[in-house]
Amino acid sequence: MISEAEYLDSYDASRFPSPLVTVDSVLFTLHEQALRVLLVKRASHPQQGRWGLPGGFIDMEKDESTRATALRKLTEKTGVSPSWLEQLDTFSGAKRDPRGWSLTIAWYALISWVACAPHIASVSDAKWMPVTGLDDIDLAFDHREIIQTALQRLRQKTMYSLLPVYCLPDTFTQTQLQEATEIILGQPIQRKSLIRRFEASGMFEETGESVATGARKARLWRRKPGVDIHLFSRNLLTD
Amino acid sequence: MISEAEYLDSYDASRFPSPLVTVDSVLFTLHEQALRVLLVKRASHPQQGRWGLPGGFIDMEKDESTRATALRKLTEKTGVSPSWLEQLDTFSGAKRDPRGWSLTIAWYALISWVACAPHIASVSDAKWMPVTGLDDIDLAFDHREIIQTALQRLRQKTMYSLLPVYCLPDTFTQTQLQEATEIILGQPIQRKSLIRRFEASGMFEETGESVATGARKARLWRRKPGVDIHLFSRNLLTD
DNA sequence: TGAATAGTGTCTGTCAGACAGTATCCC
DNA sequence: GGGATACTGTCTGACAGACACTATTCA
């Protein structure tokens, strides 16, 4: 019978084989009427040259948790923190990575296009891929499946929350939120239903400003600081 | 410039430090009007002797994925496969395990009490703990937080699905489902609302049998084989 | 027949869908 | 004023909440 202190003294983690652990994120944005995903060209093996999700290994010195890893990798690529970041799922198995049994903690994230467009534009190894064009390109590992899972989650959550605001700039109009929602869901929604939810959510406040996008000026809104996302008890588009 | 084959030939996973990876499950059941969680007495260090969640390391030879790890560990402890098993979240960080930077893939699962009661009763290192009594015991690592997260998820999903059926035996009455739902949610629900959902779900069929539990006999139902869980577009108990 | 449990009928309230209507802006 | 975009009013329908009602079983 040894004590816990003695046990820990003699413990050597490297004695046990462990899976290859990575953290990958599906970062969505909206641009030119399309929902887009950030893809990164893999600089090194394995699958060098293919497009894949931004991500990488945990830095056990720097990262407080895998959320920190996901954030670190995303800010490295985009220059900013995403407005939304939530754990999606993990994907694991012996066959998904040629190096051996592997495990990825997958996250999904949202950011406005304007917030990171300049940074992305300045690098050649990253691009915003419309989700409708994913079938045509060869993605690394099981990243296609991860993106599909993220898409489902994003669409599901859009039906019972106002999640798409996290794809918009800091200030935005109700029409922009409607358009964002419609692009994500892939179909028109009732403006009236959206506005009802917008008001009931208590998430937003007027900036006092308004913008003209052709005809009548539209009021600008922002997310109230410190207010969490509101989840509704009914879904949109239930048929 | 080396080829992918050359790269893989010379790749040695053990060169890189990696976090300690475990898989833990929160297995719920219902017994004696209480929602209970399976706890296991830790046989070895660290935290030897404390109660914790059933789980352990991935067996890279045997386990096809972390789902397989969760299933393997649960069947070792209970003798049966859970009726429901779904990924919950991952928990990670440098401080949650004294051995170093660690990561656990957490799952939550449901099983009927009758299906595994005999097996659990035969071992002394496992017990079904009512979730209301968790405050009084000293749990290993961050397992209390994991259980709380699982509870929230179970309650949330109970509001928009008939998830509690997976806590019932293969055949059950509508009243049993109502009781299960009420215990999980911690408050009474409208029987009529439950029955409406029960019928609309298309998940069940009558066995033709009925049982007497006092007065009028109640019809027995079972889940239709191969039919997936139905998700409703509204929640119960929205106030 | 009465007590207890199983199961149904039906009214109300809430909120999404639908769409017509009004307001504001620029030409 | 007309056309375009922003925003509101209000009816309908689906379904949860509430609860009274009927049905079946046993003592």
Image: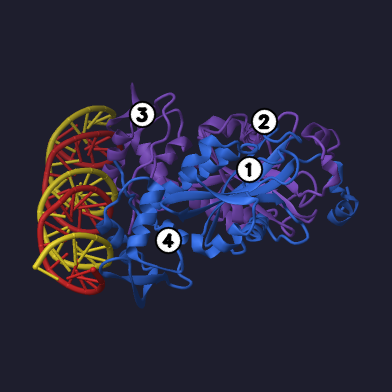
Chain colours: A purple, B blue, C yellow, D red
Q: Are marks 4 and 2 in contact (CB under 8 Å)?
A: no
Task: Name above or below for residue A10 compared with residue A239.
Answer: above
The outermost residue toward the top is: A208
> Residue D9 sits in which quadrant?
top left
Tell us which disc is closer to us: 3 or 2. 2
Measured as percent of width and height from the top left, residue A186 is found at 42, 53
Measured as percent of width and height from the top left, residue B221 is found at 37, 71
Q: Amino acid at mark 2?
A: Glu
The 10 Å Cα crowd at callout 4, few under 14, some 14 to 19, many 20 or more, is: many
On whether disc 1 and disc 2 are found on a single subunit, the reply is no
Q: Amino acid at mark 1?
A: Trp
Please report the residue visible at 27 percent of the width from the left and 32 percent of the height from the top.
A216
Seen from the viewer's position, the closer of residues A22 and A176 is A22
For the residues labelled 3 and 2, the Cα–Cα distance comes to: 31 Å
Measured as percent of width and height from the top left, residue A33 is found at 45, 45
Tell me the residue that label 2 is attached to: A64
For the residues labelled 1 and 2, the Cα–Cα distance comes to: 26 Å
Tell me the number on the disc at residue B165: 4
Tell us which disc is closer to us: 1 or 3. 1
Q: Amino acid at mark 3?
A: Phe
Tell me the residue that label 3 is attached to: A204
